[in-house]
Amino acid sequence: MAAYVVGEVIIKDDAFAEEYRPKVQELVERHGGKFIAGGTFEKLEGSRALPDWFVIIEFPTSELARAWYNDPDYAPLIKLRDTGSGSEITLIEGLE
């Protein structure tokens, strides 16, 4: 069953992004994932502040999503991202 990783990112300094984006793209693909949303977005309801970036990554299974997140090659990318942002990363199981 598909699983989705939802990333909400508040940018403090986007200097990290040029290095981060291509490396995270390659790592996501290595684990069978693909970015399915991440363009512009708009709030339809609620009072919570919106992040600067909002991305959704689809993986074939939750195991592959966890393997991507826990991959030792991703750890330095998390540190890089954290140099210029604050993030909320959530794993959501797909519906059958």
Image: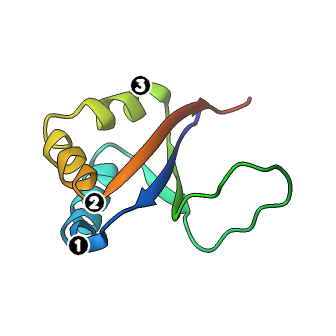
Q: Nearer the viewer, residue 86 or 20?
A: 86
Determine contact: label 1, label 2, CB under 8 Å.
yes
Q: Position of residue 14 (x, y in %)?
A: 31, 71
Residue 23, picture quadrant:
bottom left
What residue is shown with label 1? 15
Q: The C terminus lies in which quarter of the figure?
A: top right
Q: Which mark is residue 84?
A: 2
Tell me what residue is drawn at x 47 percent, y 41 percent: 88
Q: Secondary structure at mark 3?
A: helix
Q: Is residue 31 above or below residue 34?
A: above
In this picture, residue 21 sits left or right of residue 48: left
Tell me what residue is drawn at x 18 percent, y 54 percent: 80
Q: Position of residue 58 (x, y in %)?
A: 52, 47
Q: Is residue 9 above or below residue 16?
A: above
Q: Residue furthest top?
A: 63
Q: Disc 2 marks which amino acid?
A: Gly
